[in-house]
Image (cartoon, rainbow, N blue to C red):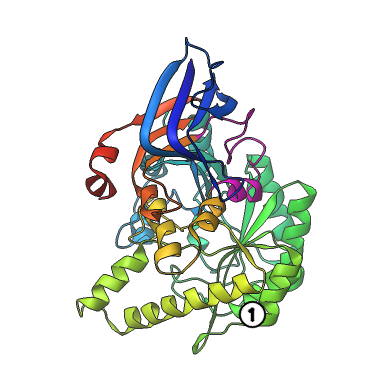
């Protein structure tokens, strides 16, 4: 099937600028030409989809999701009561919702029993609808460490290396390690490191030997420092937390920048829920502390940016009150609350994201020869970042999964 897509503007995912009056020729699964809508050589036999009032761009890429969690009030309790068979069916439903929202690629950074792998393969085979998935399988953690219930406990360098090899044998695309404790595991300490530098180096060495990148969950500054020293590829959360709240270490941030380690800050729409509860007087003391930390976090991320740190778009969707299809409104927070330029946020969620998670040769930008993973949104997100929440057309691999003109006619309703 051949398509010609035309729109008011095009964001390629490679630069921050928009191209006016574009046309994209898609044949089969690939983009074969990027040109202007008045190009007389465009084939007359192709199906033409005119998207007036819209901007064409690459499909969105969420670099940190958990398909295994259900985004409810207590995802861990729900999962522990759920069979693998039911979980996998539910994950398929969530995958379709993500694709409908314009997310054409996602990196799953922690599942149970490697369930993300058959989901990934079923999507690739066309059995079910969903984004391209880059999967880590169960994350490596210490005995009783963060997310131990996902089945990835490994203590000491020998067990860690074996754990990496087992995951590669099972077919993972990357490796996830819990460098600190986390909030979803009672008894773990998110402020303290779980692994030594040597243990983390074992993760990195073994993963890189087998050509897999390493994503490190880290909240506490001690764990961030060790992960940076070990040379991981992406820092998940990277929230610099300490006993008194923020424990930001500029020297560590400078090392992150110098080593070219990517920061994946996992911004979710759960931030908005906290904000609403605080405004309504319904937030308890813990929620109030969390909200104060979020405000500080934006300042911290801006300072990291000033120091040369680079970011990729990510949400942690699947955790409590963070639906899997809520990537676009979460990225809008970068602009509206964090003060980041829209063009940086879009590139961090498309072209840059694809390169960092290892799929840049296939997708992430509107370039001839790449997969036709294309999103059309009502409006121009460079001028109004909320346009990302108004998908009109979603194409993945040359197949149209959504074409809804109502988002152009009624943008406010589409955003809801």
Taking the image as drawn, is residue 137 in sight?
yes
Q: Secondary structure at mark 1?
A: helix
- 265 up-or-down from 379: above or below: below
Does the segment drawn in magenta span residue 166?
Answer: no
State the residue lying farthest toward the top: 45
Counting every numbered tag in the picture gives 1
The answer to whether residue 19 is left or right of residue 336 is right
Among the 4 quarters of the image, the one containing residue 251: bottom right
User: Magenta segment, principal secondary structure?
Assistant: loop
Residue, disc 1: 222
What residue sits 30% from the left and 33% below the top?
Answer: 404
Taking the image as drawn, is residue 158 in sight?
no
Q: Position of residue 201 (x, y in %)?
A: 76, 65
- 163 up-or-down from 354: above or below: below
Q: Position of residue 190 (x, y in %)?
A: 52, 76
Q: Which residues are magenta?
A: 350-373
The answer to whether residue 70 is left or right of residue 368 is left
Among the 4 quarters of the image, the one containing residue 228: bottom right
What residue sits 19% from the left and 76% below the top?
Answer: 280
Q: Which is more toward the observer, 341 or 389?
A: 341
Q: Position of residue 158 (x, y in %)?
A: 75, 60
Does the segment drawn in magenta span residue 361?
Answer: yes
Q: Which is more toward the observer, 365 or 269?
A: 365
């Amino acid at each position: 099937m051949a398509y010609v897509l035309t729109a008011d503007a095009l964001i390629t995912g490679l630069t921050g600028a928009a191209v006016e009056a574009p046309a994209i020729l898609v044949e089969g699964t690939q983009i074969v030409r990027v040109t202007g809508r008045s190009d007389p050589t465009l084939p007359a036999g192709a199906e033409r989809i005119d998207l007036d009032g819209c901007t064409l761009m690459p499909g969105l890429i969420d670099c940190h999701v958990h398909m295994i969690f259900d985004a409810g009030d207590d995802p861990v309790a729900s999962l522990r009561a759920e069979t693998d068979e039911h979980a996998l069916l539910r994950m398929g439903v969530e995958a379709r919702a993500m694709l409908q929202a314009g997310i054409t690629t996602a990196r799953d950074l922690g599942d149970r029993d490697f369930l993300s792998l058959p989901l990934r393969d079923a999507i690739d085979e066309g059995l079910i609808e969903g984004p391209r998935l880059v999967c880590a399988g169960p994350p490596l953690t210490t005995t009783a460490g963060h997310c131990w219930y996902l089945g990835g406990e490994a203590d000491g360098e020998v067990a860690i290396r074996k754990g990496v090899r087992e995951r590669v044998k099972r077919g993972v695309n990357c490796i996830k390690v819990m460098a600190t404790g986390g909030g979803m595991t009672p008894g773990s300490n998110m402020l303290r490191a779980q692994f030594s530098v040597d243990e983390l180096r074992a993760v990195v060495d073994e993963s890189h030997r087998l050509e897999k990148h390493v994503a490190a969950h880290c909240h506490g500054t001690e764990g961030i420092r060790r992960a940076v020293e070990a040379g991981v590829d992406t820092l998940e959360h990277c929230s610099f937390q300490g006993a008194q709240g923020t424990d930001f270490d500029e020297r560590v941030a400078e090392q992150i920048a110098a080593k070219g380690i990517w920061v994946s800050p996992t911004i979710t729409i759960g931030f908005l829920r906290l904000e609403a509860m605080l405004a309504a007087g319904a937030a308890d003391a813990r929620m109030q502390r969390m909200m104060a930390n979020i405000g500080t976090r934006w300042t911290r991320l801006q300072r990291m940016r000033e120091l040369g740190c680079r970011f990729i778009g990510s949400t942690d969707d699947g955790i409590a009150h963070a639906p899997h299809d809520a990537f676009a409104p979460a990225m809008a927070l970068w602009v509206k609350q964090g003060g980041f330029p829209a063009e940086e946020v879009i590139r961090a969620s498309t072209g840059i994201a694809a390169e960092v998670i290892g799929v840049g040769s296939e997708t992430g930008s509107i370039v001839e020869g790449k997969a036709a993973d294309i999103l059309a949104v009502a409006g121009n997100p460079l001028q109004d970042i909320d346009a990302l929440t108004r998908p009109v057309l979603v194409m993945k691999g040359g197949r149209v999964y959504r074409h809804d003109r109502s988002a152009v006619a009624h943008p406010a309703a589409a955003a809801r």
